[in-house]
Image (spheres, rainbow, N blue to C red):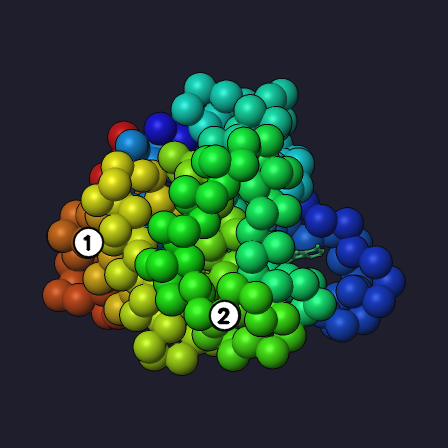
Amino acid sequence: MIEVKGLRKVFQLSRKQMKVNNTEEKYKVAVDGIDFIVYDNEIFGLLGPNGAGKTTTLRCMSTLIVPSGGTISVNGHDCVKDPLEVRSQLAFLTSELKLDTHFTPDYTTRFFGKLHNMDNNKIETRMEYLFDYFGVTPFRYTKIGDLSTGMKQKLSIVVSLIHDPGVIIFDEPTNGLDIITAKAVTDYLLELKAQGKTIILSTHMMHVAEKLCDRIGIIMDGKIKAIGTLDEILYMVKEKNLEDAFFKLYHQGNRGELDA
Ligand SMILES: Nc1ncnc2c1ncn2[C@@H]1O[C@H](COP(=O)(O)OP(=O)(O)O)[C@@H](O)[C@H]1O
Ligand SMILES: [Mg+2]
């Protein structure tokens, strides 16, 4: 179980960022005190427009950045006090992961397995399974720089999941992918759920949230506006579909309270 309580993240802006953002403010509140729980073996989705604070929230959960306030615990381990333990239990995936183009999938995957202190037998077994599942096997000795975009994306999933973590955090899983690769990725998320994993994803796409998520948190401007199952959100917002509910919240700024 993952518990996020009063999470806040404030970035100090550089002069250049202030100029780009066209603001005199020296600080940007990216995440403004959010609470949610992700239960074991569910797919939880953070749904929100660009700039809502999704990536920042997921980076805090993955221990990549330190929150300005609030707490996050992953299976009872605090993300700030016990980051190494948290890291061993989760994978953070993003569609923007960059792999070194000079190496092969075989070499890269082994390298990451060793970083996770896996022994060679375990690396071998996991690698065969994942390479097979994602169709990487025929390209295992091809330089990454020569792979297609879809194959690179599949390889980055393989690399992130080599240590078989129980919690998978996936930032915008299908962003920028062609439809075939996007389908392979969403099918795999359902497969991971069937294996008993806990999955948190972010998306700005209604159909991704609708199709994959057991529970959804709608995040806008650093705040959670509504949280619950799709049916709970529709009931609460009094709308018939997620898109209408989303825009109603966007215009009204309601705060849903269905989740305890
Ligand atoms: N490192 C950073 N420095 C300054 N501002 C940031 C930084 N990272 C994110 N932000 C700002 O915080 C807000 C939330 O960003 P982000 O979490 O990336 O949103 P999302 O993933 O929902 O699109 C945005 O306004 C973004 O510009
Ligand atoms: Mg983002």
Between 66 and 18, the one nearer to me in the picture: 66
Q: Quadrant of residue 107?
A: bottom right
Q: Amino acid at mark 1?
A: Leu
| Drawn side of residue 212 relative to residue 204, left or right | left
Is residue 102 in view? yes
Location of residue 25 with respect to 20 vertically, above or below: above
The 10 Å Cα crowd at callout 2, few under 14, some 14 to 19, many 20 or more, is some
Quick one: SS at disc 1? helix
The amino acid type, in three-letter code, at marker 2 is Phe
- Mark 2 highlights which residue? 139
| CA separation in Å, label 2 and label 1 | 40 Å
Confirm if mark 2 falls within 8 A of ligand 2.
no
The quadrant of the rendering that contains the C terminus is top left
Q: Nearer the viewer, mark 2 or mark 1?
A: 2
Residue 259 pos. (x, y %): 26, 36
| Residue at image coords 61%, 27% | 84
